[in-house]
Image (cartoon, grey):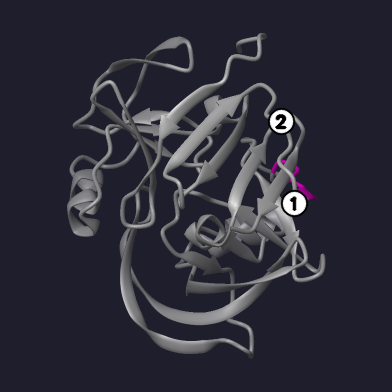
């Protein structure tokens, strides 16, 4: 980890509700839902980012699965930047200005609401969580998820609006119903579109105590600061 407070500034691309940072000809996918950093099978084996030179291994999925999923979603990245690297710094992501910045410490912005962001429980990674719905439920914060997801049955207030396909490197391609509802986060009620976590994944999230995977809805609603060293989440309305 860098011990100085160098601030890294990047262009931020919203590619189909996936946050990407293009740098030096490499497309970095910012994925707080992944415990590790990986290369796409089509991506480079060695890169330099955040002041470090990295040798990367491929995403541990069956041959051809990740390529098929990328083509299905028309979403292409070279390196998946996971929590083993992202958790060393604080990150501020703003889709409205298409900017991202990262540093060991980022100055607090005015009118930002801060909520606790502990690592997920009973999991070998440091994937972040926060409490939602007035503290009654736990959400896993996954910037890599283009949809949000519900673990188990949808709330009674949710409205079914259709079906869509999605992809996960470990689950493969799947189809999910899509609902619309609102979710309380940090005192704000935000609109969300969410699917249902497919089998066999619910058991994993239930063991973690999580009822939600909060995906791109968070980045659409706020300028978001993931202060991983301080274990807090900053939410600023635009």
Direction from residue 27 to residue 182 in the image, left or right: right
Q: Residue at x 20, y 54 (%)?
A: 74
- Place of residue 126 in the rendered image (x, y in percent of width and height, measured from the top left): 64, 36
Query: Could you say whether the residue bearing mark 2 is in a helix, strand or loop?
Result: loop
Please state which of residues 33 and 121 is positioned toward the viewer in this rendering.
Answer: 33
Whether 110 is drawn above or below 81: the answer is below
Whether 180 is drawn above or below 15: the answer is below
The picture quadrant where one finds residue 2 is top right
Whether 102 is drawn above or below 219: the answer is above
Q: Which residue is drawn at 19% across and 44% down?
A: 67
The picture quadrant where one finds residue 190 is bottom right
Whether 97 is drawn above or below 167: the answer is above
Direction from residue 89 to residue 116 in the image, left or right: right
Direction from residue 174 to residue 136 in the image, left or right: right
User: Is residue 117 covered in magenta?
Assistant: yes
Image quadrant occupied by the N terminus? top right
Q: Give the distance between the C-alpha atoms of the residues marked 2 and 1, in whole angstroms.
A: 13 Å
Farthest right residue in view: 135
Image quadrant occupied by the C terminus? bottom right
- Place of residue 76 in the rendered image (x, y in percent of width and height, measured from the top left): 24, 43
Q: 10 Å neighbourhood of mark 2: few (<14), some, or many (≥20)?
A: few
Indicate which disc residue 56 carries.
none
Query: Could you say whether the residue bearing mark 1 is in a helix, strand or loop?
Result: loop
Q: Residue at x 75, y 71 (%)?
A: 133
The picture quadrant where one finds residue 139 is bottom right
Q: Which residue is drawn at 66% across and 21% down?
A: 104
Direction from residue 160 to residue 41 in the image, left or right: left
- Place of residue 90 in the rendered image (x, y in percent of width and height, measured from the top left): 64, 31
Indicate which disc residue 111 carries.
1
Task: Write down the region rendered in magenta.
Answer: 114-119
Indicate which disc residue 107 carries.
2
């Amino acid at each position: 980890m860098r011990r100085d407070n160098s601030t890294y500034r990047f262009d931020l691309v919203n590619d189909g509700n996936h946050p990407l940072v293009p740098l030096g000809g490499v497309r970095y996918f910012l994925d707080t839902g992944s415990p590790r950093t990986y290369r796409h099978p089509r991506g480079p084996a060695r890169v330099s980012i955040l002041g470090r030179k990295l040798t990367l291994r491929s995403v541990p999925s069956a041959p051809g699965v990740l390529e098929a999923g990328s083509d299905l979603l028309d979403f292409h990245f070279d390196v998946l930047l996971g929590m083993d690297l992202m958790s060393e710094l604080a990150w501020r992501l703003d889709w409205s200005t298409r900017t991202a910045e990262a540093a060991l410490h980022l100055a607090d912005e005015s009118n930002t609401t801060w909520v606790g962001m502990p690592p997920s429980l009973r999991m070998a990674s440091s994937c972040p969580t926060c409490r939602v719905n007035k503290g009654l439920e736990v959400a896993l914060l996954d910037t890599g998820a283009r949809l949000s997801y519900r673990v188990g049955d949808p709330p009674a207030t949710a409205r079914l609006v259709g079906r869509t396909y999605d992809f996960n490197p470990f689950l493969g391609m799947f189809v999910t119903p899509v609902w619309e509802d609102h979710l309380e986060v940090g005192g704000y009620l935000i609109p969300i579109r969410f699917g249902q976590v497919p089998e066999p994944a619910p058991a994993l999230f239930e063991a973690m105590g999580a009822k939600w995977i909060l995906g791109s809805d968070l980045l659409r609603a706020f300028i978001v600061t993931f202060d991983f060293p301080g274990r807090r989440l900053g939410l600023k309305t635009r």
